[in-house]
Image: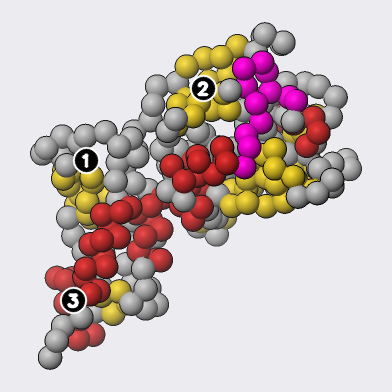
Amino acid sequence: MKTPCFLFTACIFLALMFTHSCSGAAIKKNYSGTFTDDRDGKSYKTIGIGTQIWMAENLNYETEGSVCYENSDSNCDTYIYMKKTMKAVLMPLIAFAICAQAQTQIFTDSRDGKNYKTVKIGSQIWMVENLNYETEGSVCYENSDSNCDTYGRLYNWETAMKACPYGWHLPSHSEWQALVNFAGGMDAAGGKLKAKSGWDERGGSSGKGTDCFGFSALPGGCGYDGFFDFAGDWGGWWSTREDDSYIAYIRSMYYNDYSAYWDYRDKRGLFSVRCVQD
């Protein structure tokens, strides 16, 4: 009987695509380590091969669409699962790849003297913190200064379009997309861009990310017409992209998801701003 070799081939190909060092830098020839899957606590040996980090064992995560060879647990202990579907395998590998951050710099906003950390991600230079420049059309979450210290200010779209300091600007659709693509695509980028702390944990689900590139996204929530919601759970950041005269697009991340997805909101709503360098 022919064996389903294509399953093994698919696993190797996808692992090659997604289990890499975030920095893209060369890895020491004799690198080895361990990775713990926080879904079930299983640990896997890892090894550096060229510029990539590979698991040195086949995945052994039990989920629908997977079986042990001949339905024997002992075979799972030896050979691990044969997968009919790949999504459950890839999510932790994408979101929790070994990370190496670029060195941060400091930028001072001459308008109010506030300092912001900045970092280069791919070919772009981003502020590592949400903008906290006080101007008409912006507020602190629940009108509390302490929330501004943590999350920055929330801005309506018209204000967000001109809120960044000289030499910086509100990201366009393509600039956000370039960042997300660099961080592994929409389904994985949230896990790599979210901060390592500051996100809620509910029902055993941790909202924190790996902060692979030093972007340190925090869940600043939103506001509308005097009401506020979702701080700690969700973050939304304005882009320059408009849908029409009333609606514009935001990039969103949620505490229990690895993705960084597009959403659209009323321009009068209040959301966070991240500035990117001109």
Crowdedness near tag 3: few (<14), some (14–19) or many (≥20) residues, C-alpha within 10 Å: few
Residue appearing at x 21%, y 34% in the figure: 26
For marks 2 and 3 on the same chain, the one whose residue lies earlier in the sequence: 3
| Picture coordinates of residue 202, whole percent (x, y) | 57, 55
Which residue carries the number 3 mark? 5
Residue 78 vs 134, above or below: the answer is below
Q: How would you classify the magenta stretch by its main secondary structure?
A: loop
At label 2, the amino acid type is: Thr
Dot 3 falls on a residue whose secondary structure is: helix
| Picture coordinates of residue 205, whole percent (x, y) | 51, 56
Q: Give the range drawn in magenta.
A: 162-173
Residue appearing at x 24%, y 79% in the figure: 68
Q: Is residue 266 visible?
A: no
Magenta stretch holds residue 222: no
Question: Which of the two residues, 42 or 167, is positioned nearer the viewer here?
Answer: 167
Which residue carries the number 2 mark? 118
Marks 3 and 1, how far apart at CA:
26 Å
